Image (tube, rainbow, N blue to C red):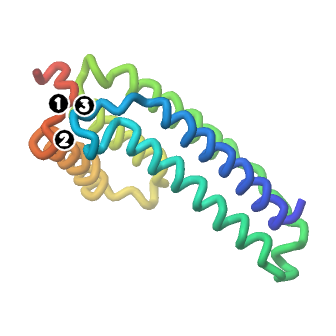
């Protein structure tokens, strides 16, 4: 199968997914008190329309590309065992994060999740512990401050609360 055909199929699937997600997000009840406020369906709608729009860009790009190398069949590389294990570990880690989110709390579970997730996807040669720790701690703390102090939305405190 050519790269062009793969891009077309991917774009169509993503457009269907984005459109379905947009239709589903219309069913969310707008929980805002004022008609002009952003409701609970705003972010899902923006995400779904962004997916559909980017899929349309991929589709148009694939249909307009006349390059011979782009239209030829490409050899698909198979994933290595290490790649498969990283993917499986990420899925298990995400499930553990979701399970621990409320009982342990947002801050601790997010810090541990990010630290382990970044460690899984960096090779031993490229691991630099200081940036990993800074991102793993800094990102959840910034999100916590944004939600709690700016948006006035409480996140699960877990064992810290």
Real-space CA distance between mark 1 and mark 2, rounded to the nearest whole angstrom = 7 Å
Q: Earlier in the sequence, mark 1 or mark 2?
A: 2
Dot 3 alpha-carbon crowd within 10 angstroms: few under 14, some 14 to 19, many 20 or more: many
Q: Are marks 3 and 2 in contact (CB under 8 Å)?
A: no
Position of residue 96 measured from the top left corner of the image (x, y, whole percent): 42, 24
Q: Residue at x 68, y 42 (%)?
A: 81
Real-space CA distance between mark 3 and mark 1, rounded to the nearest whole angstrom = 10 Å
Per the image, the residue denoted by label 2 is 147
Give above or below for 24 relative to 123.
above
In this view, the residue in front, 117 or 148, is 148
Per the image, the residue denoted by label 3 is 106
Quadrant housing the C terminus: top left
Quadrant housing the N terminus: bottom right
Q: Is residue 42 visible?
A: yes
Q: Nearer the viewer, mark 3 or mark 1?
A: 1
- Left of 153 or right of it: where is 76? right
Q: Residue at x 21, y 50 (%)?
A: 138
Give above or below for 25 relative to 7.
above
Per the image, the residue denoted by label 1 is 154
Q: Is residue 82 visible?
A: no
Q: Are marks 1 and 2 in contact (CB under 8 Å)?
A: yes
């Amino acid at each position: 199968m050519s790269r062009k055909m793969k891009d077309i199929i991917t774009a169509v699937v993503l457009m269907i997914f984005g459109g379905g997600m947009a239709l589903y997000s219309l069913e969310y009840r707008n929980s805002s008190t004022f008609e002009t406020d952003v409701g609970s369906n705003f972010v899902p709608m923006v995400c779904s329309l962004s997916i559909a729009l980017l899929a349309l860009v991929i589709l148009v790009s694939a249909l307009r590309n006349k390059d011979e190398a782009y239209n030829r069949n490409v050899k698909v590389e198979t994933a290595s065992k290490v790649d498969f294990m990283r993917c499986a570990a990420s899925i298990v880690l995400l499930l553990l994060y979701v399970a621990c989110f409320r009982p342990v709390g947002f801050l601790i579970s997010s810090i541990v999740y990010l630290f382990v997730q970044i460690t899984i996807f960096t090779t031993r040669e490229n691991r630099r512990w200081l940036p990993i720790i800074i991102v793993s701690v800094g990102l959840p703390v910034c999100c916590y401050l944004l939600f709690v102090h700016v948006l006035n939305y409480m996140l699960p405190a877990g064992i810290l609360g």
